Image (cartoon, rainbow, N blue to C red):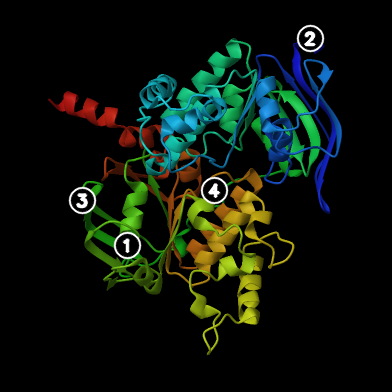
Amino acid sequence: MQDDVILNISDLHKSFGAVRALRGVNFELRRGEIHALAGENGAGKSTLMNIIDGILQPDSGIICWNGTPVSIASPTEAQKLGIGLVHQEIALCPDVSVAENIFMSATNISRRLLMDYRALEDRARSILGQLADIDPAMLVRDLPISHQQLVEIAKALTLDCKVLILDEPTAALTEREAQILFSIMRRLADQGISIIYISHRMVEIFDNCDRVTVFRDGQYITTQTVADIAPSDVVNAMVGRVVDTLYPDKMRPQDGASDRTPPILDVRNLSEAQRFRDISFQLKRGEVLGLAGLIGAGRSEIVKGICQLEGDVSGDISLNGTPLSIRTYGDSIRAGMVYLSEDRKGDGVFLDMSIAENISALDLGLVGNRVGTIDAARETDLAETLAAKLNIKYGRLSDPVSSLSGGNQQKVAIAKMLSVDPKLIFLDEPTRGVDVGAKAEIHRILRDLARSGVGIVVISSELPELIGVCDRVLVVREGQISGEVSGEDMTEENIMHLASVLDAADAQLQSA
């Protein structure tokens, strides 16, 4: 069996100051297998992958490549061995083209004085053809996040990989794009390429992987064949305790309001140029409302339009029965409507600023004094109160947000929304890239907020999350609401039927 092992890691240790990120971990990867690596944020998964890719160096331990001990001093050395890593956080150059990003490594070592852009774009087009219809001449900054993730994957596919590491690769992908990626993964595995697959999504692990290794708190816990272990066992090994449920109980009769009470949000005939049109819906008191749809359907655009974050929007919006006139996002905040971006690192938090500074950033007037400067004591009090309410795990409130795990970073982003005492929160992909334990906590927070009278609207590409956390789901297709599901009708099949363009075409054919 050892002849089948391409990568073997033994007793690896890595510390960052007093923080022990890896404590004697072991990991074995066989040729041609898809091996899942599971664990909560902070378990040590990304640290191990960065060591394998030469980004970090271990404090001690042994890494064997094809049975021979090696020292991987840099990402260049890793590439020479045949290791490719697709990071969870997108690391593209936004101001150059897709093609240039895909072949950046090859371009950097090329001795050509002039670049043949047409040839580069043709090569990029052949790679991208396996994944999606993306123009290789486009600037990366003009692509949606899902397509940027596919460009990252395309970069890795151009390398002569023997081991491909995918860190949460589907976090920003549509279901269709994810299925294409899974098909490519299986094809690569059939060719003898080994894949390390990091994901918090149990369905993806059990549908596509051969084995799964679990880390917890920087330590190796177990390795099992997926056929011999249940998803609940993996989750329990990840968190070190039994997780009874990922989703809290839904709205109870006493959570709602009488028929005479106006809805929290009433949207009528909302339209914006070519992106969405004739959007009308209500958010009832006490409920969590979901927005589903394929990437590009207009979900985020509708919510951003309501908050006046982008676009020239027409239509009528009322909050708690009061008509609103919203011209800027500042007006929206003052009215009580806030938006949590799907791009946590880009728009949700300021990574290099402190936890306390992030929490107060939405309205500095809350922590200002008479002379126009920040009152540090007020800022700290606000941060302490919200950090306790959301169970944020941190060292000091003066620590940068970048020092926190992904789940705690997301809680800081939510705390920033709560700092202005909102009446309504729109949350766009609120648990993207967040581990199972943190997901359950965030879902509980959202339900508690709804019960306390705060309006909650959730946009998610994870259908199980929408079904589990929402009382009702509106489905958006091509800039319009194509339908609504609730109760027993809230199934993945029904949501996908309403979201699919193909379904609309079929319906037209049947009615013709």
Task: Give the CA distance from mark 4 to mark 1.
Answer: 24 Å
Residue 308, numbered circle: 1
- Taking the image as shown, residue 150 lies to the left or right of residue 219, namely left
Q: Are marks 1 and 2 in contact (CB under 8 Å)?
A: no
Look at mark 3 in the image and give the residue it sits on. Answer: 273
Circle nearer the viewer, 4 or 1:
1
Residue 233 visible, this angle: no
* N-term-proximal mark, 4 vs 3: 3
Circle nearer the viewer, 4 or 3:
3
* N-term-proximal mark, 2 vs 4: 2
* N-term-proximal mark, 4 vs 1: 1
Task: Give the CA distance from mark 4 to mark 3.
Answer: 30 Å
* N-term-proximal mark, 1 vs 2: 2
Residue 27, numbered circle: none
- Amino acid beneath label 4: Thr
Task: Give the CA distance from mark 1 to mark 2.
Answer: 60 Å
Task: Give the CA distance from mark 1 to mark 3.
Answer: 14 Å
Look at mark 2 in the image and give the residue it sits on. Answer: 3
* N-term-proximal mark, 1 vs 3: 3
Residue furthest out toward the left:
512
Look at mark 4 in the image and give the residue it sits on. Answer: 431
- Amino acid beneath label 1: Gln
* 344 vs 492, nearest the viewer: 344
Neighbour class for label 4 at 10 Å: few (<14), some, many (≥20)? many
- Taking the image as shown, residue 74 lies to the left or right of residue 274, namely right
Task: Give the CA distance from mark 2 to mark 3.
Answer: 61 Å
